[in-house]
Amino acid sequence: MKVIKDILYKVAINAIHGTTSVRVNAITFDSRQVKEGCLFVAQKGLLFDGHQFIAKAIEQGAKVIVCENLPNQLQQHVTYVQVDDSNASLAIIASNFYDNPSSKLKLIGITGTNGKTTVATLLYQLFQQAGFKSGLLSTVKILIDKEELPATHTTPNSVLINKYLNEMVQKGVTYCFMEVSSHGIHQKRTEGLHFEGAVFTNLTHDHLDYHNTFKAYRDVKKSFFDNLPKTSFALVNIDDKNGAVMLQNTKAKKHTYALKTMADFKAKILENQFSGMLLSVQGNEVWTKLIGTFNAYNLVAVYGVSNLLGIPILASLTYLSKLESVNGRFQHFISKEGITAVVDYAHTPDALANVLDTINNIRTGNEQVITVVGCGGDRDKAKRPVMGRIASRLSTQVVFTSDNPRSEDPQCIIEEIEAGVDPENYKKTISILDRRQAIKTAAKLAKRGDIILIAGKGHETYQEVKGVRNHFDDYEEIFNILKVIEN
C-alpha cells in the first residue's frame, strides 16, 4: 500500500480534488484491470480515450483517478488528480510506486532503428559472463538474472518497466539493458527512469506510419539523449550522420564508436565468413561467433559500454569472443546437402540491405542467394517498394510473400512490394501468398552451396492474419524442410 502524496512526487499537477492521504494497492491505465483500492490513470491513446472509462474504473473500486480532463461530476469518496500529461504522469507514478528501482541498479538504454535487440542481449550475455546478475528488457524476451519472461512490446508500458526493474532489484540484479523504442519515448514510457547510459545504433527508414516524417522520428530519438543527466554517458555510432545529432544537446558524457571514422571506440573487420568474424577492436584482434558489418557495429558498441562500465579490456575481449547470436538475428545453419539457411528479423530497407550485403560479401559468387521476404500490414507502407527493390537487386532470386498482414489484404501488400522492382530484375521474382509454401519453394530452388535468406519475422513465432495469431516460426519451418531434404 502506498500513500498518494508519496507517489505523486515530481508529477506536474494542475489540481487535486480530494484527500492525498488515501492509500492505493495498485496502479493501472487499463480499466479492465481495476480492482478495489486501485489508482487509475486515464490516458488518451491512438484508438481509445481512457477518460471514457473513469466511471467504470470507479465502479470497480478505483480510489484515485489521474486524468487530464476532470469528469463533469466528481464522486465524494474519490480523489481526482488533474495533470497536463497522463502518459508522463503514469510513468513517474509507476516509478514512485515501485520505489524508483532504476536508481538502485545501472540501467542502460539502447535506441536506434536496427541493432537494439542484439546490443541489449549481447550486453546482458557479457555482464552475466563477467559474474554480474543482469537484467534484459527486449523485444525478444525479459530476463531477470536467469529467469525468463515473455516480451510483448519493444519497450513495455511504464508500469511493467518499473515492476520488472523492482523485481530485478529484489533479486540482486546490478545491471539492466533495455531496448528503448521511438514509440516508448514518444509515449513517455521512460519518464522518471534514471539511465546510467544510453546507446544510439543507427537511424534509417522505419515507423513513418507513426511518426509521419523522418525528422519527427529522429527528434524523438534525440529527446532521449537530451534528457540524460550529466552523470550518465551517451555512446553513439558516429558513422551514422545522426549520431552527432543525438549528442548536440545532451548533458551526458559524450562517447563515440565507429568502423569507418575516428572514434573513442574503433573496430575493423579483418575476416568475415559464415563460421565467424575476426575483428580488430582498439587494435586488439578478437574472433567472434557473429558475422557481418552490422554485427561489427553491434560488437564495438557492446565493447564500448563494457569499457565505460569498468570491465577490463582483456576481459571484455574474451567475453566478446564467447557471445552467441540472438534468435532471429542472422541465425543460420548449413544442411547436410550444403544449403545455408539464414533467418533474420530484417524488416526495414537498411536492415535487409545489410544482411544481403553480408551474404554477398561472404559468398564466392557461384552460389544463388534466394530471398524470401514480405512486409507487415498496418505499418509503414512507404518502405514496401524499397524493400522490393533492395531484395531483387541484391538477390539471385526472390520470393515475395506474406509477413504479418494483420488487417490488410496480403495480396495488396505484395503488389506494393513488387512495385519497387526494377524492370531488369522482374524475372528474378515470384510471389507466393502462403509463407510456408514460399519457404518450401525457396528450398526447392536451392542447390548445394546456395544460400536462402528468410527475412522480416526473425524471432517471431506467430503470423497475424485478420487479428488472429497462428503459430509460425521461420527458423523452425526452414530447418524442418531442409531436414526432409537431408533424408
Image (spheres, helix red, strand yellow):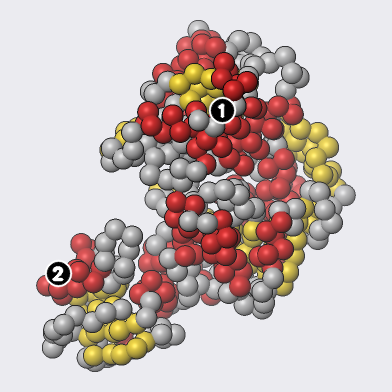
Residue located at (84% from left, 56% from top): 262
Crowding near the residue tagged with mark 2, few <14, some 14–19, many ≥20 C-alpha atoms within 10 Å: some
Q: Residues within 10 Å of mark 1 (few under 14, many from 20)?
A: many
Residue matched to label 2? 56
Dividing the picture into quadrants, the one containing residue 25 is bottom left
- Quadrant location of the N terminus in the rendered image: bottom left
Whether residue 214 is visible: yes
**Residue drawn 42% across and 45% down?**
379
Q: Position of residue 216 (x, y in %)?
A: 53, 62
Under mark 2, the amino acid is Lys
For residue 102, side relative to residue 392 (left or right): left
Q: Rounded to the nearest whole Å, what is the CA distance between mark 1 and mark 2? A: 52 Å
Which residue in the structure is indicated by mark 1? 421
Amino acid carrying mark 1 in the image: Val
Residue 112 position in % (x across, y down): 59, 55
- Report the mark closest to the observer, 1 or 2: 1
- Mark drawn on residue 30: none
How many numbered marks are there? 2
Residue 214 point in image, percent of width and height: 56, 56
40 or 421: which is nearer to us? Answer: 421
- Which structural element holds mark 1? loop
Which residue is nearer to you in this view: 183 or 9? 183
Q: Is residue 223 found left or right of 139 in the rendered image? A: right
Query: What residue do we see at 57% from left, 65% from top?
Result: 219
The mark nearer the N terminus, 1 or 2, is 2
Q: Residue at x 42, y 20 (%)?
A: 432
Q: Secondary structure at mark 2?
A: helix
**Quarter of the image holding residue 390?**
top right
* Whole-percent x, y for residue 313 in the image: 80, 56
